[in-house]
């Protein structure tokens, strides 16, 4: 996964799941989060759309 896509996925996590970073910090308190099912659904939908957009870009090349 390239850095641009990683950054977009991290933005989705911040905006939809209120997770500051997706980096492992080796602490249960920092690495596990309570999130709503509607937040997870929205984050997955956005990530899916991102994947579709990136896939279209790859086909054009």
Image (tube, rainbow, N blue to C red):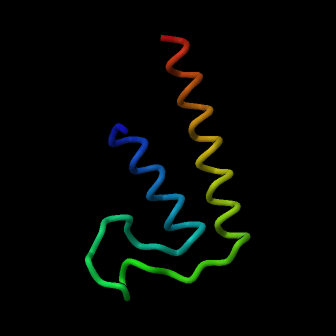
Q: Can you say whether 27 is above or below 50 in the image? A: below
In the rendered view of the protein, which quadrant contains the N terminus? top left
Q: How many marks?
A: 0
Residue 44 left/right relative to 33 = right
Residue 27 left/right relative to 52 = left
> Looking at the image, which residue is at 34% across and 37% down?
2
**Of 48 and 8, which appears nearest the observer?**
48
Q: Position of residue 53 (x, y in %)?
A: 60, 31
Q: Position of residue 36 (x, y in %)?
A: 67, 77
Furthest residue in direction left, as rendered? 26
Furthest residue in direction bottom, as rendered? 29
Q: Position of residue 13 (x, y in %)?
A: 51, 64
Residue 55 left/right relative to 27 = right
Q: Can you say whether 57 is above or below 32 in the image? A: above
Q: Position of residue 56 (x, y in %)?
A: 59, 22
> Looking at the image, which residue is at 38% across and 64% down?
22
Furthest residue in direction top, as rendered? 61
Q: Can you say whether 52 is above or below 20 in the image? A: above
> Looking at the image, which residue is at 56% across and 83% down?
34
> Looking at the image, which residue is at 38% across and 77% down?
31
**Of 56 and 31, which appears nearest the observer?**
31
Q: Quadrant of residue 16?
A: bottom right
Q: Can you say whether 54 is above or below 6 in the image? A: above
Q: Quadrant of residue 4?
A: top left
């Amino acid at each position: 996964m390239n850095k641009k896509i990683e950054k977009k996925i991290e933005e989705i996590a911040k905006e939809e799941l209120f997770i500051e970073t997706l980096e492992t910090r080796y602490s249960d308190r920092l690495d596990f989060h309570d999130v709503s099912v509607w937040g997870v659904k929205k984050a997955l939908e956005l990530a899916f759309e991102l994947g579709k957009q990136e896939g279209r870009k790859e086909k054009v090349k």
